Image: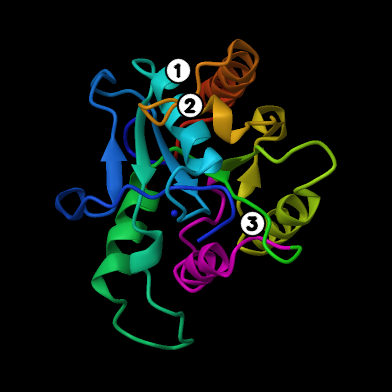
């Protein structure tokens, strides 16, 4: 765990070069557990990204959260390509610093978007997600999105990530629920996200401290 405590059909990416691909939530307290939020969508107005922004809003100040917004900047993965490009190094730094990672992705052609799969492929060689606690949130309408969940779980299992099952959620978020602040005010959605936040907190609190080498 860290040292302290993303063009889909329903999404948005707020790319801020000065933040090196992340949108931080400053209200979090110093020393709080860190959660990296990765949206698989690059579409402006994305419900996936809105759900993660809302997650961050609910998680503060108990957690330090960062919304990764550099999905479109990640180059195509080439096996054996060295050294890693700057956007990939920035991603790896954030993964290393995170105590947990939360993904929210739309379904494209029955799977997660290729851009998100590409991001995850960059983590294989460096074991960036190996034994890293992860959770997923699906905001698809009932009866949809299962392909994205299944393919995401398959890849996360392959890279050795540890799924926090109790923190994973299927929550329907409609475009009409996303406000001008790019967050969701719907009470049902926020309650489900709050439960996910609490589950991650409980998992991290129960996890043994990393051994000093």
Query: Looking at the picture, does residue 146 appear above or below residue 25?
Result: below
Residue located beneath label 2 in the image = 55
**Disc 1 and disc 2 in contact, CB within 8 angstroms:** yes
Query: Magenta includes 174?
Result: no
Q: Specify the quadrant of the image occupied by residue 110.
A: bottom right
Depth check, front residue: 6 or 159: 6
Compare marks 3 and 1 and give the one earlier in the sequence. 1
Q: CA distance from mark 1 to mark 2?
A: 5 Å
Q: Which mark is residue 156?
A: 3
Give the side of residue 128 with respect to residue 108, left or right: left
Q: Nearer the viewer, mark 3 or mark 1?
A: 1
Q: Which residues are magenta?
A: 111-132
Task: Classify 10 Å Cα crowding around label 2: few (below 14), some (14-19), many (20 and above).
Answer: many
Q: Nearer the viewer, mark 2 or mark 3?
A: 2
**Residue 207 in sight here:** no
| SS class, disc 3 | helix
Give the side of residue 26 with respect to residue 112, left or right: left
Depth check, front residue: 128 or 65: 65
Which residue is drawn at the image coordinates 46% and 32% (left, top)?
209
**Disc 3 and disc 1 in contact, CB within 8 angstroms:** no
Which residue is drawn at the image coordinates 49% and 29% (left, top)?
178
Where residue 75 appears, as percent x and y from the top left, is 38, 76
Where residue 151 appears, as percent x and y from the top left, is 73, 60
Task: Classify 10 Å Cα crowding around label 3: few (below 14), some (14-19), many (20 and above).
Answer: many
Query: Looking at the picture, does residue 49 appear above or below residue 91?
Result: above
Q: Specify the quadrant of the image occupied by residue 70.
A: bottom left
């Amino acid at each position: 765990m860290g040292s302290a405590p993303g063009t889909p059909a329903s999404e948005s990416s707020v790319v801020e070069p000065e933040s090196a691909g992340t949108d931080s939530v400053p209200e979090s307290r110093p020393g709080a557990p860190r959660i990296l939020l990765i949206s698989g969508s690059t579409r402006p107005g994305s419900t996936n990204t809105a759900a993660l922004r809302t997650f961050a809003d609910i998680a503060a100040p108990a957690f330090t959260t960062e919304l990764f917004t550099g999905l479109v900047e990640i180059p195509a993965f080439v096996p054996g390509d060295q050294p890693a490009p700057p956007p990939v190094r920035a991603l790896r730094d954030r993964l290393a610093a995170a105590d947990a990672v939360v993904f929210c992705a739309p379904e494209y052609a029955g799977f997660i978007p290729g851009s998100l799969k590409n991001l995850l492929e960059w983590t294989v060689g460096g074991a960036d997600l190996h034994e890293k606690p992860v959770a997923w949130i699906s905001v698809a309408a009932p009866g949809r999105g299962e392909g994205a969940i299944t393919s995401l779980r398959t890849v996360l299992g392959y890279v050795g990530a540890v799924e926090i099952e109790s923190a994973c959620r299927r929550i329907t978020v409609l475009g009409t629920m996303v406000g001008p602040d790019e967050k969701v005010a719907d009470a049902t959605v926020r309650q489900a996200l709050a439960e996910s936040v609490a589950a991650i907190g409980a998992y991290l609190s129960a996890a043994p401290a990393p051994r000093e080498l």
